[in-house]
Amino acid sequence: MEQPFPESDETIRATIARVLELKGMTSEGQLLRMAGLSIRHTDHDNWNGGVDYYAVELRIPLEVFVQIEPEIKDHEKRILDVAKSVWRDFESDIISTVRFVPDRAGASSGNLVPAVAGQLPAFWEDGRFRLFLSHCSSRKADVGQLKLALSALGVCGFVAHDDIEPSQLWQTEIERALRTCEALAAVVTEDFSASLWCDQEVGFALGRGVPVLPIQCGMPPHGFIGKVQALPLPRGEILASRASHIVELLLQAPQTSASMTTALARATAHASSFANAKAAAAQLETVPSLNPAHATMLKDALNTNSQVTDAYGVPERLRGILKRHGF
């Protein structure tokens, strides 16, 4: 009888990716974050009370598979070694195999959307970076404008009460957003510390280990985020003006760089207006690295998306970016 592995596919992927990135193995970390992961039961041994063995399958775009094929065994071994180390306390449930396979079904699309096992809440848009925007109600309008500016750069911002249907239990939905976000941005205003909800949201994110980015709006960060370098909002400027800076921080942070890069590349390739294409292409200048799947998306966009090809200066900028990254 098949036995499910004790932890979810997404927990396995996120944990291994994070450990790889902490060890400096960024290539494998990026591969994990872009792959569609599934784990299946392969064998059972009655020895020592029973031991179950599992195989991890990582489905990646065909273009990426071809690119890494010469070193694929090395990538698989490094990932397997991390898995064995992280779950060493699971004496009766052992990950024994890691294997990359090409996504043949998506070979013609050129799209790279990080797969997430299970159903994400509907308020998260497919293929976008998931950012929880923690704020007091006094800045709701400003945060709404920030969310709109971030959208053009591949970020889906969650704004409580704005992204929750009236029929939903709002506290439950906030918890769902906090459990599934990839980072949290805290808009630190004078009334932020007086809000029990804002402090709990920050504490929830810190407890999960996701990055917390404080935006200083008249007040310095306090508590556990007091030691985090805040992103200042100059007097007279609106929050939306910080969108590019927020994305740049997410691109530079090891924990979020891979998924933010993918989301930004996708936002550029699928830009729905000249303005969005220009904004996303400009932001791509700050990307630390591009992989072959990102390059494929951008090259396809140069041939198929008129909002990219006809946007003044964008094709030249994208070709320059691709060239600098070796494509």
Image (tube, helix red, strand yellow):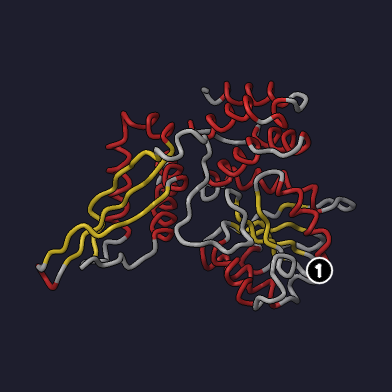
Placement of the N terminus among the 4 image quadrants: bottom left
Report the side of 223 relative to 28 (left or right).
right
Residue 127 visible in the displayed image:
yes
Report the side of 299 relative to 104 (left or right).
right
- Rendered image quadrant of residue 287: top right
Indicate the secondary structure of the residue bearing disc 1: loop
Residue 227 visible in the displayed image:
no
- The residue that appears at 55% across and 49% down in the rendered structure is 256
Q: Position of residue 222 (x, y in %)?
A: 69, 67
**66 or 189: nearer the eye?**
66
**68 or 305: nearer the eye?**
305
Q: Is residue 317 above or below residue 60?
A: above
As drawn, which residue projects farthest toward the right?
Answer: 236
- The residue that appears at 64% across and 34% down in the rendered structure is 284
Badge 1, how many Cα within 10 Å: few under 14, some, many 20+? some
- The residue that appears at 54% across and 61% down in the rendered structure is 120
Q: Position of residue 93 (x, y in %)?
A: 24, 64
Residue identified by numbered label 1: 190
Q: Amino acid at mark 1?
A: Glu
- Rendered image quadrant of residue 286: top right
